[in-house]
C-alpha cells in the first residue's frame, strides 16, 4: 500500500508525523510512504531518509489556512499540500492520502480532484467512538458538511454501513438515526422524512440518542456534520475533564491518611501519569487519530489537528484494513450500496 | 418559596422525588412543597406527610407519555401533571414548577398556560456544565426546540446571558456561538447571520466549539436544541464510559503485583465505589439535576428523566437562587434584555 502524508497541515510538529510514518512502515510490510511537505526541512532533520527504499519525499510547502474559504482556496492554491496529495491519489501514485487538519480544505480538494462516488450528493466524515462494552461505533458525519437534507442523511447511512462492513466483514451493522429521543416523530423538520428513507434499510434500529453511540446498542449512527462535530468535540473535552478530575481526586486523597498511602504507592508502584494515560487512551474518541472521508473516489483520511506519532500509526493501520478489504473497489456507486442494504421482502 | 413537584413523569420511583423534596425543605427555610401526583399512593407510602405544615398534596395521575405528540396532548389532557403544575404557576399558587421528564410536554404545557416572555419567539432550555477549571458554563438550548433560526439563537443568547447574570450577579458573562470552528464564516446557513446579530452584544466572544463548553473560555454557549441535546447526552455517556474504564483499569492492575496492593487498599481503605462516585458526580453535566426553561412567564425546571433524590435537592437549591435573585420580575420582555446586553458605543 502506498500512502501520501501531508506533514504541513497539522497543529503539532511535522517531526512527529514523520516518526509515526516510519514506525508504521516497520510494522506493516509493503508500505510505501510519500511524505508531502517541505523536503529541505525534512532532509535537514532526517538526513538518512532518502536512503530508505520505501520512503519518498514530495516537495510542497503551501497550506490552506483555517481562515481561507476552502472552496476558493483549493482552486487558487493548486500546489497546496492537500491538492498535491489529492492529485497523487487521482493519478494512482498513491492508494491513500492522509492530511491532519483543515477539514474543509481537505474535503474541498478531495471532491474537486477525485470526484464524488456516483450518486452521492455530499461526502461525509466517518469516525469511530469507543464503547462501554466491547466494539466500537461509527458516527457519520463528524464534520464534512454542516447543512444537510434527508437524502444526505440516507446516503450517510449507506456509506457508514458499507464502511462498517468493510472493517467488520462478518457483521450486519445496526444503523440508527441520531435524534432527540428514540420515539418516532421527534427531531428537526427533515428527521421524519429521513426516518421514512431509512426504514427500508436492513437492520435499521430507528431513532437513537447520542448516548447510544457509547452504550453499544447500535453500530452506525447517522447525523449531520454540525451535530457530529459537536459530539466529537464534547467527547474530547469530557475526556480531558475526566483526567483533570481524576488528578484532583488523587491529590485530594493525598492529604488524608489513606491518601498518604496512595501517594507512597503512586511513587513506588508508579500509579500516576502512565495509568492516567492508559485510561485516557481508552477514552479517546478519535483513537484512530483520523476520520475517513466517505463518498469520494479515493481513500482520504483526515487526521485530528492534534494528530501525533501514535495517532498516525493507528490511522495507517486503519487505512491498511480498508485497503486490504478492498473498500474502494467495492464502492462503485450508490446503487451498489442500495442493493447491499435495502431489504426487498 | 412555593414549589410544585410533578412526581409522576420521571423514570425513577416517585418515592425518591418525595424524599428529595422533604430533604430540601429541611435545608431551605420557608419552602412550601406541593406534591403533584397520585395522592392515595403518596399517603400510603408516606403516612405522616399530611402532618407536615409546609407540604401539600395535589391529586393528578395522568401523564403525557413519550409517544404522544406534546402539542396536542397538552390540549387534550388538561388534568395531566404537567398541565396541573403549569396552571398552579399561572394562578400564583406556586412560584416554581418542577417536572422530571417528557421535555416536549413540559415545554408545550408551559407555553400554552404561562405564555412566552414578550418578544421571545421560542423558549429554550438552559443547563449548566462543569468545567476543567473553576466555575460552570451555561449551554442553551439543550432540547426545547429542535429547529431554529438566527433570531431564535439571538434570543437564546440574551436569555442565557440574563440567566447567568442572575445566578452570578457580579459577572459579565462571556457569550459564544457554538460552531464547527472558531473562524468567522463557519457553520450552517444561519450561523453567519446569527454571528452578525450577536456581535452587537457586550462580551460576545465569537464562535466557539463544543470543547469550549468545558474548558472555561466562555460562560454562555448558544446553540439549537438538537445540537445541545446531543452534546448533553454525549457528556452523560462519556461520564459513564469513564467510570466503566476506570473500574476495568483497577481490575486490570489487580492482577499484577502492584495491583494486589491496590486491591488490599481498596478493601481496607475503601478506595472503591465511593471514590468513583465522587469523581462521577463532579463530571455530571446535569449536576443540578434540571435544566431551566427560559422564555416563558414562570420558573419551570425540567428534570432529567433519571432525576432522583440528590438531583431534586440540587434542583430546588438552583430554583431558590433564581427566586431569591428575582429572576422572573427582572425579565419582563425582550427589550429589557436588549438594553442589558447590547452595547451602544
Image: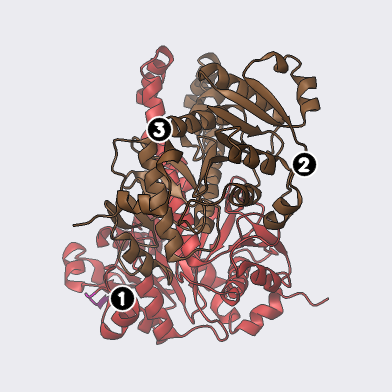
Chain colours: A brown, B red
The answer to whether any part of residue A305 appears in the image is: no
**Marks 1/2: CA–CA distance:** 54 Å
1 and 2 marks on the same chain: no
User: Which comes before the other along the chain, label 3 or label 2?
Assistant: 2
Work out whether disc 3 and disc 1 sit on a shared chain.
Answer: no
As rendered, which of B17 and A281 lies closer to the eye? A281
- Stretch in magenta: B56-62
Measured in 3D between alpha carbons, the distance from the residue under mark 3 to the one under mark 1, in whole angstroms, is 46 Å
Callout 3 touching callout 1 (CB < 8 Å): no
Mark 2 = which residue? Answer: A62
B289, B92: nearer the viewer: B289
In the drawing, what numbered circle is on residue A325?
3
Q: Which residue is mark 1?
A: B69
Indicate the quadrant where residue B87 lies.
bottom left
Q: Could you confirm whether marks 3 and 2 are on the same chain?
A: yes
Q: Residue at x 33, y 51 (%)?
A: A175
Mark 3 and mark 2: Cα distance apart in space: 34 Å
Report x, y in % for residue A14: 71, 30
Q: Is residue A20 visible?
A: yes
Amino acid at each position: 500500500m502506498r500512502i501520501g502524508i501531508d506533514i504541513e497541515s497539522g497543529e503539532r510538529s511535522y517531526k512527529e508525523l514523520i516518526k509515526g510514518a516510519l514506525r508504521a512502515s516497520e510494522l506493516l510490510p509493503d508500505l510505501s510512504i510519500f511524505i508531502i511537505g517541505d523536503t529541505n526541512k525534512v532532509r535537514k532533520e532526517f538526513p538518512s531518509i532518502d536512503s530508505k527504499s520505501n520512503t519518498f519525499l514530495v516537495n510542497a510547502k503551501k497550506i490552506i489556512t483555517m481562515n481561507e474559504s476552502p472552496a476558493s482556496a483549493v482552486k487558487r492554491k493548486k500546489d497546496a499540500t492537500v491538492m498535491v496529495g489529492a492529485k497523487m491519489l487521482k493519478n494512482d501514485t498513491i492508494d491513500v492520502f492522509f492530511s491532519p487538519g483543515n477539514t474543509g480544505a481537505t474535503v474541498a480538494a478531495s471532491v474537486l480532484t477525485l470526484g464524488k462516488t456516483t450518486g452521492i450528493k455530499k461526502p461525509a466524515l466517518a469516525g469511530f467512538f469507543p464503547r462501554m462494552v466491547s466494539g466500537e461505533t461509527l458516527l457519520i458525519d463528524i464534520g464534512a458538511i454542516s447543512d444537510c437534507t434527508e437524502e444526505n442523511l440516507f446516503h450517510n447511512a449507506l456509506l457508514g454501513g458499507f464502511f462498517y462492513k468493510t472493517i467488520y466483514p462478518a457483521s450486519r451493522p445496526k444503523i440508527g438515526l441520531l435524534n432527540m429521543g428514540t420515539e418516532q416523530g421527534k427531531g428537526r423538520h427533515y428527521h421524519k422524512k429521513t426516518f421514512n428513507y431509512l426504514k427500508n434499510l436492513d437492520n435499521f434500529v430507528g431513532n437513537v440518542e447520542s448516548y447510544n453511540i457509547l452504550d453499544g446498542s447500535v453500530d452506525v449512527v447517522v447525523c449531520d456534520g454540525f451535530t457530529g462535530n459537536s459530539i466529537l468535540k464534547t467527547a474530547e473535552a469530557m475526556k480531558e475533564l475526566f483526567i483533570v478530575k481524576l488528578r484532583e481526586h488523587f491529590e485530594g486523597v493525598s492529604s488524608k491518611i489513606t491518601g498518604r498511602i496512595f501517594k507512597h504507592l503512586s511513587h513506588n508502584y508508579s500509579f500516576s501519569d502512565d495509568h492516567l494515560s492508559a485510561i485516557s487512551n481508552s477514552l479517546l474518541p478519535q483513537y484512530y487519530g483520523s476520520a475517513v472521508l466517505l463518498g469520494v473516489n479515493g481513500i482520504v483520511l483526515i487526521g485530528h489537528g492534534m494528530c501525533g506519532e501514535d495517532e498516525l500509526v493507528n490511522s495507517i493501520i486503519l487505512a491498511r484494513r480498508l485497503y486490504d478489504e478492498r473498500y474502494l473497489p467495492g464502492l462503485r456507486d450508490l446503487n451498489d450500496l442500495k442493493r447491499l442494504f435495502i431489504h426487498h421482502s
